[in-house]
Structure formats: structure tokens, C-alpha cells
Image: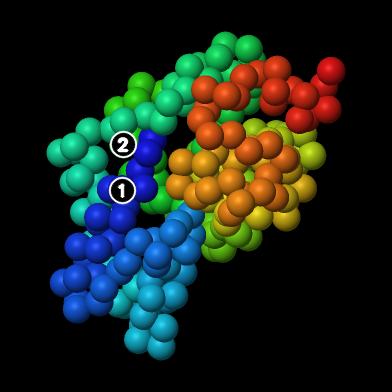
Amino acid sequence: MDSGPLHLQAWQEVFQKRGVRFTEKDFSRTFGMVNKDIITYKLNDKATGDLVTSIGQEKEKTFRSLVAREGVKPLLGAVPLIEALDRQGFRLALASSAPRENVELILQKLGLRNCFQAIVSEEDVTTGKPDPQPFLLAAERLGALPEKALVIEDAPAGIEAAHRGGMKAIAVTTSHNCDEMRTADLVVSSLEDVDTDKILTLLGHS
């Protein structure tokens, strides 16, 4: 889904309560990172353990409230692509820096939960993107070798994580421009431009 605007709104609300301004530039720079890294980036030496936990929990509760109130809008092409991959026997995992509760809520609302054989969420990792740990764990849970896995991402941190994990990566420019995502193996403006043939080609299948 295009979750960026709701995440930005949630961050701004929780930081504003504490007299801290969280800008679109802050959001763009930290998009895709885990909460503790985002909060530490913004608060620096004021980011104590209890405060990080408190802000993170409040932000995610605010985000879920926004999702419940405003609904979920999938990215163009996302649902057809996921369903096509599932039908053709691809093993699919969702690796997110969000809490499991957020992931399950969104998958339920999109009707896609049964398409995924594995989920990796914030609770499952000790280090988030751009560290490859989330993607490596997702591949492990699928029983897939990293070099046989492909990541679809909308953040530079995710592209870096995929490559550091030895995986191919497709970048979707919904949150960042082409120049910011240029290190990806394929850059597209929409998931409507991705199909199973392109994925197989990137994975070395003719």
C-alpha cells in the first residue's frame, strides 16, 4: 500500500506532542528504517530507551488508527502482481520494518494474507534496513538461497539491504525518485510495469 502519507502523519502527530518538528525531509531520509533508528536520528542523545519505546508504540497505534479510519489503498499493480506470483508457485515473503500487528492489519484489509508463506516484522530482527537481516531471515523462512531471491522495495535503505544480502532488487519510485533508487537492478514507476517474466529474467531464468 501507499503507506507513506499515513506514516508521515503519525510521526508528525507524536513528535508534535513533544515539541519536536518532524519534516517531510526527515521522513524521506528515514523511510524504511526501524522505529528506534528513526527516533534516535531525530532526538539524538535525548533518545533514552524508555522514550524510544514510548514514542514508537504511540506512533504505531496512531498509524493503525489512521488505517482503520481512512482505509487501505494498494499501490497500482500490487495486488494483481502478488496474486499472479502466488498462482505461478513463487514463494512469497513480506519483510517489513513495521510491527507485526500493522503488517497483519494491512494484509487482512487487502485480502492478501494467504499469498505469503512467511512474514518478517520489527519484532523478528535486531537490526533493520539497510542491514540485510530482515531479507536474509525472510529468505531463510522460505527455504530460499539469497542469490535465488528478489526484493521489491520503495526505499533506498531497502535496496541497499537487498544487495548487501546478495539479492536482486526492483525499485518502485513511489516514495523516492529514480536517481535515489538508481542502484537497483530494475527501476519502475509502478508495479504495473513488473511481471513474472521480468522477475524470472532478473533471477537468471531465460
Q: Nearer the viewer, residue 159 or 83?
A: 159
Seen at 63% across and 60% down, the residue is 131
The answer to whether 167 appears left or right of 24 in the picture is right
Q: Is residue 137 visible?
A: no
Q: Residues within 10 Å of mark 1 (few under 14, many from 20)?
A: few
> Is 39 placed above or below 152 here?
below
Residue 135 coordinates in the image, percent (x, y) = 62, 47
Residue 165 coordinates in the image, percent (x, y) = 72, 51
For residue 54, which quarter of the picture?
Answer: bottom left
The answer to whether 200 appears left or right of 100 in the picture is right
Residue 205, numbered circle: none
Q: Callout 2: helix, strand or loop?
A: helix
Quarter of the rendering occupied by the N terminus? top left
Residue 105, numbered circle: 2
- The disc labelled 2 sits on which kind of residue? Leu
Residue 78 coordinates in the image, percent (x, y) = 47, 26
> Is 75 placed above or below 53 here?
above
